[in-house]
Image (spheres, helix red, strand yellow):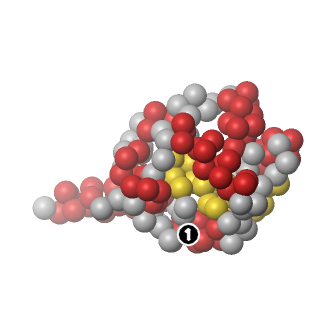
Amino acid sequence: MPCVAKIITLSQLPTIIREARCKKQRLVLATGVFDLLHSGHLKFLQAAQKHGDILLVGLETDKRVKKLKGSERPIWNLSKRLEMVSKVEGVDYIFALPEKFATLKDYEQFMSQVKPDILAVSSHTPYQSIKKILVEKYGGRLKVVLAYHPHVSTSKIWQKMKRKMIIQKETS
């Protein structure tokens, strides 16, 4: 059963942000695909949560994941990924990122609305310098909360699973 109260829409985000600001709570924003939720994801989200009072997690839409990761992805659709991440302890709210999120202008518009105190990233997050400038423009700061572990990634896990499936098919 998903933690429905944690799964929100973009239209609900301003109310949550306003309430947090009234209570002087620090907002942490983490974004990503979170396909095949694994130990690296869990460590990242737990590390991000330690930097504020409210952890907001934005997930890339299925269409964006295909563009970013290729035609075989996502492995789990958006609603399943939202459900899985909603069950992670420490995640306060989770939502789908805007469908239109590919340009610097799109990203800046989103940052101007959320204005997180902390934008949590891992050491291998792309475009860190641009993200740092944008989050600082709106009063926050970028924080690397987890070092990249090259052996723990959804892409590598998925490749290994596909190899095993091929081998099993060949031996059957």
- Mark 1: give few (<14), some (14-19) or many (20+) Cα within 10 Å: some
Image quarter hosting the N terminus: bottom left
Q: How many labels does the image show?
A: 1
- Front residue of 87/71: it is 87
**Vertical arrangement, residue 20 with respect to residue 70, above or below:** below
Direction from residue 130 to residue 155 in the image, left or right: left
Residue 133, quarter of picture? top right
Q: Quick one: which residue is furthest to the front in this view?
A: 22
- Front residue of 146/170: it is 146
- Please say whether residue 140 is visible from this viewpoint: yes
The percent coordinates of residue 171 (x first, y second) are 17, 63
Direction from residue 37 to residue 152 in the image, left or right: right
- Please say whether residue 123 is visible from this viewpoint: no
- Front residue of 103/24: it is 24
Q: Which residue position is annotated with label 1?
A: 90
- Name the residue rendered at 55%, 61% in the picture: 92
The percent coordinates of residue 138 (x first, y second) are 83, 43
The amino acid on which the numbered mark 1 sits, given as a three-letter code, is Gly
- Front residue of 80/146: it is 80
Image quarter hosting the C terminus: bottom left
- The secondary structure type at the circle numbered 1 is loop
The percent coordinates of residue 101 (x first, y second) are 61, 32
**Vertical arrangement, residue 26 with respect to residue 103, above or below:** below
- Name the residue rendered at 55%, 69% in the picture: 90
- Name the residue rendered at 73%, 27% in the picture: 105
The percent coordinates of residue 165 (x first, y second) are 27, 58
Residue 163, quarter of picture? bottom left
Direction from residue 139 to residue 87 in the image, left or right: left
